[in-house]
Image (tube, coloured by chain):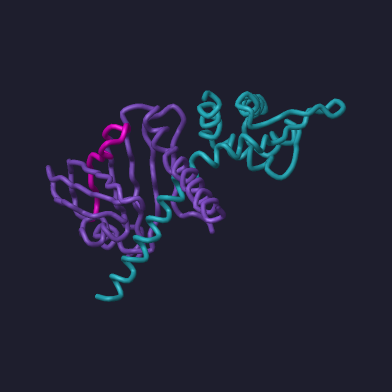
Amino acid sequence: MNLRRDVFQAIADPTRRAILLLLASQTMTAGAIAANFDTARPTVSKHLQILTECELLGQQQNGREVYYHINAKNMKQVADFIEPFRQMWDDRFNKLEEIMKNYQSKK
Amino acid sequence: MELKTKIDAEDGKQDLLITREFDLPVELLFKAYTEPEIVAQWMGTKVLKLENKKHGGYQFETTDPKGNKHGFNGAIHDFVPDQKITRTFEMEKAPFGVQLEFLAFEKLTDGTSKLSIHSVYSSVALRDQMLQLPFKQGINMAHNRLQEIVNKLK
């Protein structure tokens, strides 16, 4: 499945993750998104292009403006993929911490 | 609740990094990895062998709810108390091959510490398969539960 590979490339970059966070609650134009970053506008455009190619973002024309929105379905795929692994380790480590705290207080 | 564990798995790479900060002195965190009875408790596994030394080995065995036994084993390449363990990890009878694990134990304050596990797989595909494993198990478990409920209805 090619999409998954692309999606992971997309979220490997901190600026792209920040863009996804920005768009989590609203739709925005490229200009409004770029205003949140110190990076040059073309760089932000490039990030938007990658996120769009990976189908994490969608575009919608509204008059003269193009608004970006999150493609929730594919974002969920990212979360679903790695979250159970993370959850498994977090559960294990929570147990470790609890056991060692008891161990410490028994001493 | 926010998970304290971080997983970094960059696309197209054959490794991953697991990091977690503990509310424990580094000595206790390290002990959790080296005392067989403690390992058994938090890993939920039987510890058949655990030689905490350079060129030592370890062997764990878990039993799933169906009673099937699953073995894990590895060789310890480097062992520095309260600092690091470098070892291999292999799930027996599984198609993931052997992994190289770099465990780094770090003191943050007297009462807190950090663990980083850098796992290297023999290919990108194997790493991705491993990451998906709990997801698949989760689905299977959900299916099993569903099956149980359905069976009760019959």
Instruction: Indicate the position of residue B102 as horizontal and vertical percent values.
Output: 28, 42
Q: Quadrant of residue A58?
A: top right
Which residue is painted at 40% across and 50% down in the image? A89
* Part of the protein shown in magenta: B82-98
In magenta segment, residue B121: no
Colour in which the image shows chain A: cyan
Q: Image check: B106 left or right of B125?
A: left
Which residue is painted at 31% across and 53% down in the image? B106
In magenta segment, residue B93: yes
Q: Which of B67 and A26 is in front in this view?
A: B67
Which residue is painted at 36% across and 53% down in the image? B65
The C terminus of chain A lies in quadrant:
bottom left
Q: In this view, does A99 lie above or below A70?
A: below
Q: Image check: A94 left or right of B152?
A: left
Q: In this view, does A26 lie above or below B13?
A: below
Q: Which chain is purple?
A: B
Which residue is painted at 50% across and 27% down in the image? A5
